[in-house]
Image (tube, grey):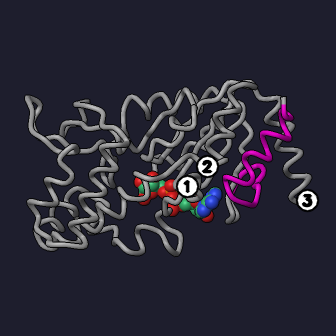
Amino acid sequence: MDDESDLSIAADWLREARNVVVFTGAGASAESGIPTFRDDDGFWQEFPVDEFATWRGIVRTALVQPRRLAEFAYAVLHPMAIAKPNAGHLAIADMERHTRVTVVTQNVDGLHGAAGSTIVHEIHGSLFEVVSLKGRFVRLISRRQVQAMSAKLERIRKGWFCLPRTLLAIRPWLGLGRRGLHRPKLVLFGDALAEPDWTLARQAVQKCDCLIQIGCSGVVWPAAELPQTAKAAGACVIAIDPQRTPADIWLRGTAAEVMPALVKRAFGDR
Ligand code: APR
């Protein structure tokens, strides 16, 4: 079947659906200028997983190679601080005018909320939330604070580097309170997924009749189980990705190109 007829069939399924889950990964934010993790220019190419994808690795890097920590924090913060929702995020939010939509995202960039999506479960946490070491809520931080952190790290990168200056630059993420040390609400390898988002995400997937997976490589668990959970519950699974992706229908292309086209084909311009 060709791309055109695939799009038409996917649009028919979406139009008939009553409960849609949109499951997104890093690819959904790539066209907002945020690198993915595993593509050629992905984060994990430049920052090895064993040094930067666990809290133990990050603490060790801070002690052994503190400058690398500042570079990593800047590489994560800068693109997310300046990012804007792309046409894919906006089409997902717009779809709420036509059907019931729940967004389940692995992304921590807050772009679904910024695009106007009203039900968003962030299963890998959020850059804009601070928690205690045990994951208890402490406070929210604004995109403006994240931009200020990124600007301070940029000055450190270009200028005189030292660890205390780096920790001061990311101070909104840190702290000490009655619940102990504070940290950003980011789920790293070996961590439990963010709650209540993970529980709510699984409930939504078990009830949905159509799941649209956008920009997920499907190699990180337990998030990667969600499309199969939807399928087992009788839902149809549509995937949007430039790379071939297992699904009932795989729509070849990018989030910002294909998602608006799919919503338009399903619901027209009304
Ligand atoms: N539009 C849609 N999909 C895209 C685009 C795009 N513009 N660009 C890349 N992709 C696809 C890639 O083909 C790939 O399938 O997005 C996917 C990105 O895969 P990963 O980099 O592995 O990102 P993700 O699946 O979100 O990773 C899962 O791993 O590192 C951890 O916690 C991190 O949440 C992350 C998790």
Answer with left or right where residue 175 lies relative to residue 172.
left
Q: Is residue 100 above or below residue 146?
A: above
**Residue pictured at 69% horizontal, 33% vertical:** 94
Residue 189, quarter of picture = bottom left
N-terminal of the pair, mark 2 or mark 1, is 1
Asked whether residue 255 is drawn in magenta, I would say yes
Residue type (three-letter) at the residue carrying disc 1: Ser
In which quadrant of this rendering is ligand 1 seen? bottom right
Q: Is residue 259 above or below residue 159?
A: above
Q: Which residues are magenta?
A: 246-269
Which image quarter holds the N terminus?
A: bottom right
Label 3 – label 2 distance at C-alpha: 28 Å
Counting other residues with Cα less than 10 Å from the Cα at mark 1, is it few (<14), some (14-19), or many (20 or more)? Answer: many
Q: Secondary structure at mark 3?
A: loop
| Residue position for label 1 | 32
Q: Which mark is residue 86?
A: 2
Q: Which mark is residue 1?
A: 3
Residue type (three-letter) at the residue carrying disc 2: Asn
What x and y, as percent, mark residue 152? 24, 58
Which image quarter holds the C terminus?
A: top right
N-terminal of the pair, mark 1 or mark 3, is 3
Q: Secondary structure at mark 1?
A: helix
What x and y, as percent, mark residue 172? 21, 43
Q: Secondary structure at mark 2?
A: loop
**Residue pictured at 43% horizontal, 40% vertical:** 123
Q: Between 18 and 219, which is closer to the camera in this rendering?
A: 18
Q: Which mark is residue 216?
A: none
For the question of whether residue 172 can be seen, the reply is yes
